[in-house]
Amino acid sequence: MTTRKTTCFWEQHKNQYTNCLCYSDEIGLYTNNIPEGYNPEELLYRPQGYIGKTVNKIKLPGRNIEITIFSNFGFGRASYLRATLDLGNTRFLDFDISKLYILNNCSITTLDVPVYRWDILFEKIINAYNVVSFENITTSAIAYIEGLSEILDRNVITVKDYTDNDKATQWKGEYLISLYVGRKIQDLVDGIETAKVSDTTLLKYTMNLCRKFIKKLKVMTCDHEMSPKSHLPEYLLSVHKFMCANKKGKEYLNIILDKEL
């Protein structure tokens, strides 16, 4: 069996990563310090530093819950560490407010953490697991959606390219702000579809954000900044699909056409 190579960082620091993800019927998900070479029954996942993409699926014993851990180490800015949680066919959504200002490798459908921060990832997984039925997320979801709405009203925002990037850049002007919010709205409505969200309050707030986004685009001045490769049409299509899926297709047309149909 071929042994996978690990990154230089991992070779230098792997002794610091002995805190592992564990599970027992009595405790549920938890972390425990397990030295390398020990493999107790409760051990689910041990931190690793393999070069390149790794995908590991973990099914909790006796539970209809699947954890999938994704990593890609050793590729600079393309590196990432994230996980997903699924209860049957339902995806857990993570409305961490810090995601509002992170551009890449960041979605409400994933638990995203800085590279090699296994401690934070395990903590996020445990917290998500402890959410009753994966449905007690309305408060954080509303805060996230209202945050997007507030960004849409601004003329300048400060955005990080990646979760673990210390540097940030400013996005200025209504076009770039709308482009950025459109990207986040697309992720939001895709997440709602993936998670099969039926919470009426969450759907109402998302619908209001979509209305605001369309109206913003209608009055926005599109000058030389509007690149032929702009993703705005793609983001608007996502809004259109979401509104149609929630029986608001006619309202979408009314807003676009400025007339009652």
Image: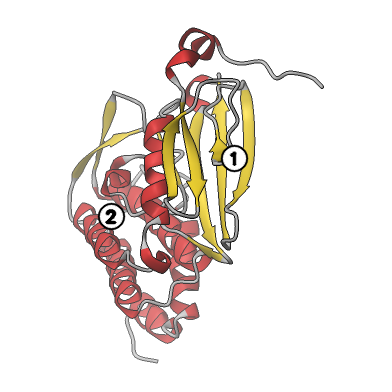
Q: Which residue sits at x=36%, y=43%? A: 224
Q: Quadrant of the N terminus?
A: top right
Q: How many marks?
A: 2
User: Of the residues shown, which amino acid type is indicated by label 1?
Assistant: Glu
Residue 100 relative to residue 48: left or right = left
Work out whether 24 lies above or below 31: below
Q: Which residue is pictured at 55% across the width and 18% down the height?
A: 74
Q: How far from the left and from the top, in percent, is residue 114? A: 40, 30
Give coordinates of residue 206: x percent, y percent.
33, 69
Q: Which mark is residue 221?
A: 2
Q: Position of residue 118 (x, y in %)?
A: 44, 31
The quarter in which the C terminus is drawn is bottom left
Please identify the quarter of the rendering in which residue 160 is found. Answer: top left
The picture quadrant where one finds residue 129 is bottom left
- Nearest to the eye among marks 1 and 2: give it: 1
| Mark sitting earlier along the chain (1/2) | 1
Residue that mark 1 sits on? 41
